[in-house]
Amino acid sequence: MNLHLKPAAHTLLSMLFLGLFSLACSGNKQKEKTAVNDTTGKQVKIDSANIKPADNKTIMARREVPVLCYHQIRNNIASDSKRAHDDIIAPDKFREHIKMLADSGYHTIQPDDLYNYLVYGAKLPEKPIIISFDDTDEDQFTVGNATLKKYGFKGVYFIMTVSIGRKGRISYMTKEQIKQLSDEGNTIASHTYDHKNFAQFTDADWTTQIDEPTKKLEQITGKKVEYFAFPYGVFKSSTLHKLKEHGFKAAFILSTARDENYPLYTIRRIIDPGRYTAKNLYYSINKSFNKTKSK
């Protein structure tokens, strides 16, 4: 009897050991986060269990990644105000500017790539850049996305949900177009319900301007919405912490100074004005972003 029990006990112990080893490996894998290198399409693992997240001072000191912001891609009309001209770029000029970026060796990245770089020090491709679009205008799909595709670029689309599917003097993207952008590897992100100034948010606005738009976009794309752009680029320092509480990993302003206490929620962008030549844009990118700021 004892001769038969010993092998069985040995087998049982072996199975128990293998089970515990597999469980431990599984636990380690769950602690890894993945990012996608936008230039290769390959997943890059971030071992967040063993890499300490950077503090705010370290994030502020990292070299800023250029982030461009576009609104309307169309020709000017007589009724456009002088102020509106900064938010309008002609389709031919937009195509010229994107070609310049490609010819200059820029590689588009996504917000997840930027987040992992800022927080965990993950590597980025040479000359990284984010190309973003605000307000849901349909020309961002018909002209913007079509142009980016030509050069293998991806974009970030900050959606104002009140406008989805609207037609008129300005037409806006449909749910189907937003879903297609997401399916093709672009990032769909939040830009409030109806462009309300963040600095004027009431308690109720955190539901109507933040939570409900997030839910709608997640229903459209089937993916989590984790990034936000402030209407007008305006933020309020005292309520930035609530963005994290409402599920956002990072948020984007325009060209004003970042908040040293919330650098992830005040990532800078610059507008590419319609009056710029491609050379002007190249100069502006280098002047605005190609430096580090030690604090």
Image: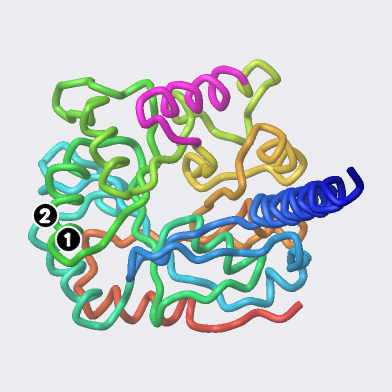
Asked if marks 1 and 2 touch (Cβ < 8 Å), the reply is yes
Q: Residue at x 23, y 80 (%)?
A: 279
Quarter of the image that includes the C terminus: bottom right
Residue 192 at x, y = what percent? 48, 30
Q: Quadrant of residue 84?
A: top left
Please, is residue 138 above or below residue 54 in the view?
A: above
Please, is residue 94 above or below residue 204 in the view?
A: below
- In the displayed structure, does residue 67 sit left or right of residue 46? left
Q: Circle 2 sits in a helix, a strand or a loop, which is it?
A: helix
Q: Write down the region rendered in magenta.
A: 207-224
Q: Circle 1 sits in a helix, a strand or a loop, which is it?
A: helix
Q: Foreground: 151 or 62? A: 151
Residue at image mark 2: 91
Q: Residue at x 26, y 47 (%)?
A: 184
Magenta includes 218? yes
Residue 65 at x, y = what percent? 49, 71
Residue 188 at x, y = what percent? 39, 41
Disc 2 marks a residue whose amino acid type is Pro
Residue at image mark 1: 94
Q: Residue at x 30, y 54 (%)?
A: 86
Q: Quadrant of residue 100?
A: bottom left
Classify mark 2: residues with Cα within 10 Å, few (<14), some (14-19) or many (20+): some
Disc 1 marks a residue whose amino acid type is Phe
